[in-house]
Amino acid sequence: MRILVVDDDSRIRDVLRRQLSYEGYQVDLAADSKEAFTQVADNPPDLVVLDLMLPGMSGLEVCRRLRTADDMPILMLTAKGTLEDKIDGLDSGADDYLVKPFEPEELLARVRALLRRRQPQTAALKFGTLTLDPSAHQVWVGDRLVDLSSKEFDMLELMIRHPRQVLTRETFYDRIWGYDFSGESNILEVYIRYLRSKLEAAGSPHYIQTVRGVGYVLRDEAPGSPSDG
């Protein structure tokens, strides 16, 4: 999922970039309306986090213009928290309104809620004891709900849509991160370890298996097979 953050304060942009990237979102940044419109035209985001107070064109006008061009969710951020300010923001086309200062957990919860509304309703995906619901963004092992980060969820969804198919490291980087930094980081291994640990702690068999030198595969655990790390 790609999120565009529009804010003229570089410190706020950096904080939001780190918070959202940590949850696995791809984050683009813009400091004013011109940059925002360019980003939307060149790389349409799944959600816009938009500051109300921008230099030149106001956030309200940016919101109105974005709304006429696309139905992407817009979360408006501002230090102006009166009822009239909130009404103006929502009437301009914003889907939600968050007043600064805010807690990171609340921001992330609102982002998840807005993205869920945008996702098409699709049938749940199943593999063995695993159930993945793309529309609700939830995963179960049997009847136990598993708390996954956005990136972990996307990785499992990719594997469960291609069961028993070996997916290369390059496939994960391209489909999940959107670009290749193979050889520059062990982030894929780290996320696979997190994902495998969470699923197995909830009672899942050892479905996620390593194909050394190639990538990973979701397949039924062979009886008595040793751990592949």
Image (cartoon, rainbow, N blue to C red):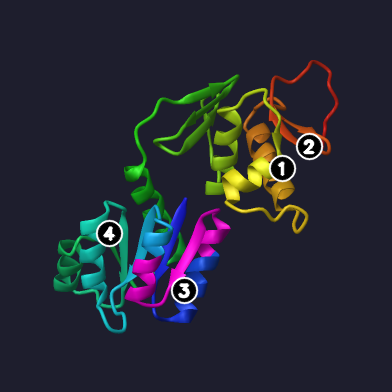
Residue occupying the point 19% across, 74% down: 82
User: What amino acid type should be assigned to the residue bearing mark 3?
Assistant: Arg
Q: Which residues are magenta?
A: 19-38
In the rendered image, the vertical position of residue 119 relative to residue 10, given as above or below: above
Q: Nearer the viewer, residue 143 or 75?
A: 75
Is 20 magenta? The answer is yes
Q: CA distance from mark 1 to mark 3?
A: 30 Å
**Up-down relation of residue 72 to residue 221 (above or below):** below
* Sequence-wise first label, 3 or 4: 3
Do we see residue 101 in this rendering? no
Which of 192/45 is in front?
45
Q: Residue 96 has which mark?
A: 4
Q: Earlier in the sequence, mark 2 or mark 4?
A: 4
Residue 41 showing in the rendered view = yes
From mark 2 to mark 4, how far is it between C-alphas?
Answer: 43 Å
Pointers 3 and 2 in contact (CB under 8 A)? no
Verify CB contact (< 8 Å) between mark 1 and mark 2. Answer: yes
> From mark 3 to mark 4, how far is it between C-alphas?
19 Å
Disc 4 marks a residue whose amino acid type is Asp
Give the labeled residue for mark 1.
169
Closer to the observer: label 3 or label 4? 3
Determine which residue is flagged by label 2: 214
Q: Is residue 127 left or right of residue 66?
A: right
Q: Could you tell me residue 52's position as x and y percent?
A: 28, 74
Label at residue 13? 3
Is residue 172 shown left or right of residue 223? left
Q: Based on the displayed image, in which of its 4 quarters is residue 32 positioned?
A: bottom left
Q: CA distance from mark 1 to mark 2?
A: 7 Å
Does the residue at mark 2 contact the one at mark 4 (Cβ under 8 Å)? no
Residue 191 appears at what percent x and percent y? 67, 47
Residue located at (51% from left, 72% from top):
15
